[in-house]
Image (tube, helix red, strand yellow):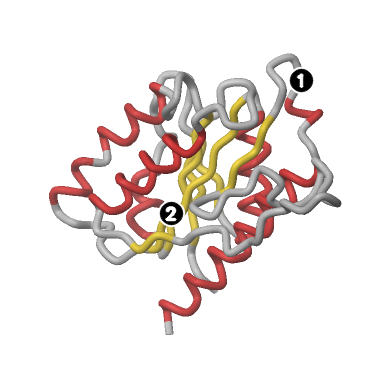
Amino acid sequence: MADIVVVYHSGYGHTQRMAQAVAEGAGAELLAIDADGNLPERGWDALNAADAIVMGSPTYMGTVSWQFKKFADASSKAWFSQAWKDKVFAGFTNSATMNGDKLSTLHYLFTLAMQHSGIWVGTGLMPSNSKAAQRNDVNYVGSFSGAMAQSPSDAGANEMLPGDLETARLFGARVAEVTQRFKR
């Protein structure tokens, strides 16, 4: 079994629900970045020991939250020593609007992974883009580069659509499958 860590920041609980779904699919450990942008004790040790790191952040103003950015900047110690080289990486995000510039957030996460000399995993899911598609279908938002979800600004985390959470779960399972291939 691969050792996978889902490191994420969640401002209102939506990204946390996605993180939980990704972790369920991947059989992964959850590692929350707190409201001050810090990891819990031994968080860095868990990331250094992981075979795969899945990163998650809400999309705020077209990019990651400042708390996630603080974590990313702090990861420069691992970058300098190339401690995360050849680890599998993936990412996910949520925002209030259908587009919400979520791709900018995933691109930020991808760039961070590439700076760490990582190997990026996309969703591997076809989009639900036919006339028969329904908003609650898997990968309705239609992302290939990482899991995306959309939650209306006045909806609580408990109101997230099961289709978006299933997308996150399936994405986590794909990350686990790809990571296992690299462990062989």
User: Residue 54: image x %, image y %?
Assistant: 48, 51
Query: Looking at this rendering, what residue extends furthest in the front direction?
Result: 131
Q: Which of the two marks, 2 or 1, is nearer to us in this view? A: 1
Q: As shown in the figure, which amino acid type bears the numbered disc 2?
A: Ile
45 sits to left or right of 82: right
**Rendered location of residue 64, percent (x, y):** 43, 29
Q: Quadrant of residue 96?
A: top right
Q: Looking at the image, tell me whether mark 2 or mark 1 is earlier in sequence order.
A: 2
Residue at image location 49% in from the left, 22% down from the top:
60
The 10 Å Cα crowd at callout 2, few under 14, some 14 to 19, many 20 or more, is many
Q: Which amino acid lies under the numbered mark 1 shown in the image of this protein?
A: Ala
Q: Is residue 34 above or below residue 171?
A: above
User: What residue does disc 1 label?
Assistant: 155
Judge left or right: residue 42 versus residue 24. left
Q: Position of residue 109 (x, y in %)?
A: 39, 43
Quadrant in which the C terminus is drawn: bottom left
Q: Is residue 161 above or below residue 114?
A: above
Q: Residue furthest left?
A: 80
Q: Residue at x 55, y 74 (%)?
A: 1
Task: Give 172 or 128, whichever is nearer the viewer.
Answer: 128
Q: Which residue is rendered at x = 28% and y = 57% of the image?
A: 84
**Numbered label attached to residue 71:** none
Q: At x 25% / y 62%, what residue is drawn?
A: 85
Determine whether the residue tagged by mark 1 lies in a helix, strand or loop. loop
Q: Nearer the viewer, residue 11 or 41?
A: 11
The residue carrying pointer 1 sits among few (fewer than 14), some (14 to 19) or many (20 or more) residues within 10 Å by Cα, namely few
Percent x, y of residue 47: 38, 51
Q: Secondary structure at mark 2?
A: strand
Q: Which residue is mark 2?
A: 53
Could you tell me how far apart the alpha carbons at marks 2 and 1 are, in whole angstroms?
29 Å
Examine the image and state in which quarter residue 123 appears.
bottom right
